[in-house]
Amino acid sequence: MVIRSEYPDIEILDVPIHDAVLGRAAEYGDRPALIDGVTGKEITYHQLDAMTRRMAAAFAELGVRHGDTIALYSPNTILYPVVFYGATRAGATVTTVNALYNAAELAKQLKDSGARFLVTVSVFLPVATEAVAGTSVEEVFVCDEAEGFRSVLELLGTKAPEPVVEIDPANDVAVLPYSSGTTGAAKGVMLTHRNIGTNIVQAEASINVAPGERIIAILPFFHIYGLTVLMNLPLRLGATVVVLPKFDLQQFLTVLQDHKINRAFVAPPIVLALAKHPAVDGVDLSELKYVTSAAAPLDGVLAEACAKRLGLHAVLQAYGMTELSPGTHAVPQDEVDPPAGAVGKLFPSTEMRLVDAEGNDTEVGEIWIRGPQVMKGYLGRPAETEATIDRDGWLHTGDIGRVDERGYLYVVDRLKELIKYHGYQVPPAELEAVLLTDDRIADAAVIGVADADGHELPKAFVVPMPGVTLTEHDVIAYVAERVAPYKKIRRVEFIEAVPKAASGKILRRELRAREASA
C-alpha cells in the first residue's frame, strides 16, 4: 500500500538554490542573517546577498564555469553560506567535506568529485595541502587568513562582473555531499537545485520558522541535515542563524542564553547532555521554544526527560537521509501530544511504502520513499544508484519502520550495515579494509553495538595472525591513526574466525547474536 502525506501537495521549486534561499533577502534587509556565536560578527541579509554575488564574480574570474565542482572543507563559519551560494551562483557544484576528515579521506573525495578549487580555514591547511597533491585542485583558499594563501575576503574585493549562468534546476547538481548510503564506501550524492530547494518547502509544512526567530547552528553545515535546516531553511524564511564552529557544551549553553535562542536542531548526544548534564542547571533557556533531534535514533524516554527539564511540550524528531535531500518526515511543531519515539509524519508531496524482503507491502518493513527530494543518483556509480532507486522511482532506505494510526512513523531497526555513531555514518566495510592493512591481523569484521546509554558504536571482531600477540589497545590505536575521529573502533573482541557465507559475505547477524548473548 502506498502511504501518502496528509498535507496538500506543494509546488515544485524549480529555481536555483541561491534564489530559493536568498530571493527574499531584499525584504529582510538589515536584519541579521548570520551571527558568529564566538566573535559576535554579523552579516545582514542585504550583505549576504551582495557577498554571494561578489563571490560568484570572483569564482567566475578564476575560471569557474557551469558544471565545475568546488570543495568546501570547513567548520561552521558565517562565511560558509557566502562561499556556498557564491559557488552555485557561478554555476558550480559544491562538494561539502566532513571537517573531521584526514588527508587521505579528503584526497579521496577531491579525486572522486573532480574538484577544481578547495576552500578551507587556516587551521585545516596541514591536512588540506597534503590532500590536494595529485588531485585536480588548482588552488586552495581560506575563509580567514594564512600566509601564502588567498582569502575569501580578498576574493570578495573583485571588480569583475557577476556571471550570468543558465541553471537547469531539475538536472544541475547544486551540492555533492558524500554518504555511505545503506552500506559500503562513501559515494557522492547528486542533489539537484530542485531536490534541495523543494525539500525546504516540504519542510516548511511542519517546521514553521518565523522571520526574526533565532536559531543556533551547532550541527555542521557540511552534513546535509545542517545544510538544510540550519542554513537553507532559516535563511529562506528570514531567521537569524547564530553560528558555532563545534559543539562545546558550556559555549553552547552560553549562546543559547545570551543570544536568546528560540530553536535548536540537534542530534541525540546533545539531547542527552541537555537532559542530564549538571551544567544546564542555572542557565536561562526560557526563550528556547523548540528542540528537534535527527540524524540518529532518539530514545523516547530520553526525549521526554529532556523536554521536562527544559520546560518544553516535547523534543521533536525528524527523519531522512542524505539521498533524500534529506527530509521525508518531521513531528509537527504544533502537535500537542506527539507520540514518544516517533520520527514524524510524511512531508507534503511524498509517498512511502513499507516492504518486506519479497517486495510485498507489510505493516512493519523497509521504508521506501518516492518524491521530488529523491537524489539524482550517486556520482559515477550507476550500479549503486540502480540498487538504491528502483525503476518506479522508489528509494530503498534500508531502515525498517512502522506507522501508527495517526500517521506517525517509527524507525524500529535497520537492514543496512551502516553504523550511526552520534549521528555520523560509519561504514563497516571501510573499517574492515583499514584493519586488514595491519600485518598482525588475519581477518576482521565490524558491527555496531550499543553502549551503556544505548548509542551505537563500532566494534571490531579480529582474528590475529598466528603467533602474534595483539591487544585491544593495539587495534584501536592502529585504526585511530588512519580514520577520522568519529570512525574509530571503540571495542575489540578477538575470535578464531569471522563467520562468512559461501559467497564470502560476512555474516554480521551471527556476530550480532554473539554480542547479544555475551
Image: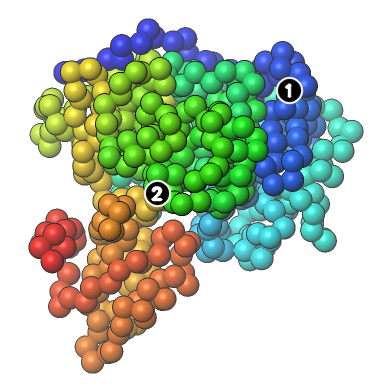
160 left or right of 51?
A: right
Residue 393 in sight in this render: no
- Residue 201, given in percent of the width and then of the height, sits at 49, 18
Which mark sits nearer the N-terminus, 1 or 2? Answer: 1
- Residue 70, given in percent of the width and then of the height, sits at 64, 43
Residue 55 in sight in this render: yes
411 left or right of 78?
A: left
Q: Which residue is mark 1?
A: 31
Q: Which residue is mark 2?
A: 276
Q: CA distance from mark 1 to mark 2?
A: 35 Å
Q: Residue at x 37, y 35 (%)?
A: 308
The residue furthest front is: 282
Between 107 and 477, the one lying in front of the other is 477
190 left or right of 516?
A: right
The residue furthest right is: 159
Mark 1 lies on a secondary structure that is: loop
Q: Residue at x 74, y 15 (%)?
A: 26
Instruction: Name the kind of residue labelled 2 in the image.
Output: Lys
Between 163 and 180, the one lying in front of the other is 180
- Residue 438, given in percent of the width and then of the height, sits at 36, 78
Figure quadrant of residue 78: top right
Between 421 and 52, the one lying in front of the other is 421
Mark 2 lies on a secondary structure that is: helix
Relative to 455, residue 339 above or below = above
